[in-house]
Structures are given as C-alpha cells and as structure tokens.
Image (tube, rainbow, N blue to C red):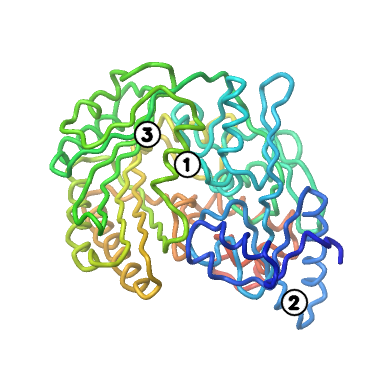
Amino acid sequence: MLLGKAVFFPEQAAYNISLSAYWSQQEQTLTPSCIVSPHNTQDVSKAIEVLSEYQAAGTSITAGCKFAIRGAGHTPWAGSANIDNGVTIDMSSIRSVHVNRAKTVVSIGGGARWSMAYQILDAVGLGVAGGRVADVGVGGLITGGGMSYFAPRYGFVCDQVVNYEIVLANGTAVNANSTANSDLWFALKGGSNNFGVVTRFDLKVFQQGKVWGGTIYNPIDTLPTQIQAFVDFNNATYYDTNAAMINTYGYANRIGSWTVANLLVYTKRVVNPRVLRPFTNIKPQLLNTMRLTNLTDLTTEQVQNSPSGLRQLFLTRTYGSEPIFLTEVFQIVNTTLQTFAHTPGLVYSLVYQPLPPAITSHGAATASSSNALGLDPAAGPQVLAVQAIQWANASDDALINAAARKIWRQADALAVKEGLHRRWIYLNYASEDQDPIGSYGAANVKKLRAVSKKYDPTGLFQTNVPGGFKLFKQEAGAAAMQ
C-alpha cells in the first residue's frame, strides 16, 4: 500500500477520531470506505495519483473512488468535506506554520486551523488576515474567499495570499502566484476545491499588537437602535478600516427569548474607539467581554458560540444596507420561528455583517490583484446576511430546512420589491442547494471553467469530488470538460 499507516479503516481508532473532529453532526455521521491522512505534499501527490489512475481506468471500481477533501471540516452540510463509501483525504496532519526570516510572509499548512497560526504570530508581534473563530480551517476559509477582522484594511483573506502550493489532478505539485500559474492563483481566490488540493498557503503578515475586542449582549428591545447603528457603521462615508463587527440576533430554545450580540473589534490598541461607541453605549448590557487582547484569545472566545457535534445549517444572502428593510427581515424571521421554536437544542441566529466598499474594493476587477468573487465596490455598502441554525436531532431536519428557506424566500421577495436584492452569495456560508460560484458573474465563471479545463483536463475534481460547489453545475459529468 503506497501510503501504509496513513490510511485508516472503519475498525481503527484513528478513523473514528477523524470523523469526530468534524464540526457538524451531519458530516460526522458519514462513513467513508477509508480515510487518508497525508503528512506532507508528497503524500498528497501519491493519493491523488492513485485516485486519478482509477478515474482513467474507467472500470467499475471507479464508482468507489469518489473522494472528499477535508481541511478542518467546518462546512456543515453532509458531503461538503466527507463522503459515504469513498475516500476522505484528511489534511489535518499538514499543519505547520512558518514565518520567513524577513517577517513578511507566513506559510501555513493546508490542514491547519487558524488558532495554530495565531499562536505563532502573536508570540512575535505579527498579524495575518485570517479566520474569526479559532478552530475554523485555513484551507476552506481561504479558498472560499474568507472574512477576517482585518477585511476593511486588507480585503478578503484570499486577497492576502501571495502563493499557493497545490497538488493537481495528475499528482504534480505546483506553485500558483503572480508570476507562476497566475490564472490558477486568481481562480483559487474563491474557486474552492475545484482545481486541486492546496497543501500550503503563503500569506502576507504585518506588525500587530493588542486589539480591543469582545462581545456585548443586549436585550431584544434594543433592536431599533442596534439596526440603525449597524447601518450607520456600514454606510459611513469615511469608513474606519480598523473597525470590524458582527451584529447577531439570537434565539435559544433553552431560554425562550431573543438576545442581541455585537462582536466588536478594533485592530489597533485603542479602548472604546469613537467608531464603536454607538454599539458600546447601548444599554442595558447583559454581558460585556470587551478587553485589550490578542488574536488567539479573541478567536478562541468565539469557539464557545459554535460548539461541535450538533445539527448545523448555514444559509446566506446579500442585501442592500437599509434599516427598515433589515428590521422587516427580523420580523419575517420572528414570525416563522414560531413554527419551530420548540425544536430540541435549537439555537437560531440571524447575522448581519457589514460589506462596505472598504472591503470589496481590495479584490475587485479594477484592483492590482483581483479575486474571483465578482464583488463590485460601485454597488456601495451591502449586508452579508446569514441564518446560522443548530439543533439536536436529525428528525427535525426537514422542519428546520423548510422554515429557513421560507424565510429567505420572503426576505428575497421584499428585497426585490424595495430594490435591495443583491446577487452575491458568500461560499463559506452557503448551503448545498445554493450556487455561490454562479453569483460571481458570468465573466468570472467563464475564467474559472477555463482554469479547470487547463489544469484538470479530465475533470477529476469536477466528477470524482462531489462535495463543494462545482463549476459545471448545469452540465453532466465529464462531458462538461470537453
């Protein structure tokens, strides 16, 4: 066996340990035929070579050689990074973090989690645009675009990648950057798992001291003030690029009521900066964790808000930034919630995140280094809206899924009526029935398909990796690759 001890089977403890490390219950319950745990790029190359050979053979065994690529396994829907009766490539052993001598670039293994990078960087006074929750994986976040606390300063996380090391469908490892395979470099900035297995990400780093951040919780009757403060923040003419925030309206079955939570971060050593005072001044406060801290501590705090092992659902939309509309969306949610509020273990969150031109301009088509996301800063301030839902039992899946989609249908209809509907869908928050790559626009989809045909001419990552969001969604199998 080519990879020997790096291959785990269902009767082995390492197999079950790998499955239990997935974030969602949906992913934990899938049962691959085996799990491959590569330790370096060479191992990944060997695994892809074997899987590619089975595809080329075209025999009946090919059907058993579908495979999944798993970084940290934080995407919730079943089959996104795991597979039944196939091969799961678990990248978690490729997790090294290395800062170059000039302290300008950090190289992070494709299976690392952001906590691993922050621990190294905090110790030497450096920062990187990365995930906002410590146990989120580096690979999935970046290849889906990636939001960070530094987004207003540096754009999406993918905009900070200077080089990808990636194993292609033929098992060859190549670098993709501004001078080598630059079309692939572009495609990996939002193109997800469609082109190969990324084994290393090289990102720009910068000098970074303490940040001021945490979460403030308020009662739901502060909602009108909250939404106005959010819109004023998002729509500011002079956007303070050191400030970041997430505005969440949460309902917990065990409590039986709504709460507002504002995650607030200022990426300079400034306590209670003016730009965040519209939120910090809202009273009463049920809990306040604001403090001067580092990225390791700040992102670790967020882990407690997203425990693993439960049923999970993300659904996302992008809307215009207008207070009456955002209030009406909450009212739609609150009305529909009554049909499933009794669900055991339910924690429902309606999340609003600012998406101003300060963020979208960094990777726009007119930028010096564009990404594949297709966002246009000329569209002005937008709102990244997310339904994040967790619950206990699979028997409630149909109820939750139907209700969540009903909410977005009603919100979409209202948004269209009021001229506030936007086409973009953020891949890292999308559910399996959404089409985030299609939302990048026809021109970018055409570019991504061309890159796929160039670097994966047999369509290995289109036909044999069913998880993720495919480039040839409307076309059938390998015929799409001709």
User: Of the residues under marks 2 and 3, which one precedes in the sequence?
Assistant: 2
CB atoms at circles 2 and 3 under 8 Å apart?
no
CA–CA distance in space, label 3 to label 1? 21 Å
Report which residue position mark 3 lands on: 356
Whole-percent x, y for residue 150 in the image: 47, 29
Report the Cα–Cα distance between label 2 and label 3: 46 Å
Question: Where residue 94 appears, x then y in whole percent?
Answer: 71, 46
Label 3, residues with CA under 10 Å away: few <14, some 14-19, many ≥20? many
Front residue of 171 and 370: 171
Work out whether 203 lies above or below 458: above
The image quarter in which residue 175 lies: top right
Name the residue carrying label 1. Answer: 133
* Disc 2: which residue: 62
Q: Residues within 10 Å of mark 1 (few under 14, many from 20)?
A: many
Q: Amino acid at mark 3?
A: Pro
Q: Secondary structure at mark 3?
A: loop
Q: Position of residue 112 (x, y in %)?
A: 63, 44
Residue visible at 13% across and 42% down in the picture: 221
In the rendered view, tell whether residue 44 sits above or below residue 84. Answer: above
- Which comes before the other along the chain, label 3 or label 1? 1
The residue tagged with tag 1: helix, strand or loop?
Answer: loop
Quadrant where the C terminus sits is: bottom right
Disc 2: CA contacts within 10 A as few (<14), some (14-19) or many (>=20) = some
Determine whether label 2 and label 1 are within 8 Å by CB.
Answer: no
